Amino acid sequence: MDSVVTINPKVLGGVPCFAGTRVPVKALFDHLESGYNIDYFLMQFPSVTREQVQAVLENSRHQIEQDAVLALRQ
């Protein structure tokens, strides 16, 4: 994920951002939660690539699936 998301204390105080940008990953989720689609997000933040967005969403899905499996085992 280092090529997709970076955390740098000197950039926005260490908030996770899309690599090579100052766009917080949270901005993607805020847009989606507000009903906007990925295309709209990409228009608002042209420094973020579609591939980065897809990778973040895929990683999030994978993490949720792993958490669910772990919860079932407890």
Image (tube, rainbow, N blue to C red):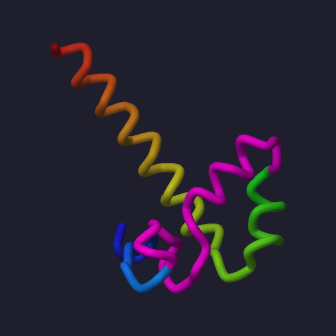
Please give the name of the residue rendered at 63% of the width and 50% of the height, measured from the top-left corner.
Answer: 29
- Res 72 quadrant in image: top left
Say whether residue 22 is magenta: yes
Q: Position of residue 65 (x, y in %)?
A: 37, 31
Quadrant for the C terminus in the image: top left
**In the image, which residues are magenta?**
12-36
Please give the name of the residue rendered at 46% of the width and 40% of the height, measured from the top-left corner.
Answer: 61
Quadrant for the N terminus in the image: bottom left
Q: Relative to 25, does residue 33 appear above or below in the rendering?
A: above
- Res 41 quadrant in image: bottom right
- Res 22 quadrant in image: bottom right
Q: Relative to 46, does residue 5 appear above or below in the rendering?
A: above
Relative side of 46 to 17, left or right: right
Relative side of 28 to 74, left or right: right
Q: Relative to 66, does residue 72 appear above or below in the rendering?
A: above
Nearest the viewer among 10 and 46 is 10
Q: Position of residue 66 (x, y in %)?
A: 29, 33
Q: Position of residue 62 (x, y in %)?
A: 38, 41
Q: Position of residue 16 (x, y in %)?
A: 45, 66
Relative side of 35 to 27, left or right: right
Relative side of 23 to 7, left or right: right
Count up the numbered dots.
Answer: 0
Please give the name of the residue rendered at 50% of the width and 71% of the height, measured from the top-left corner.
Answer: 17
View extreme (front): residue:
13
Nearest the viewer among 26 and 69 is 26
View extreme (left): residue:
74
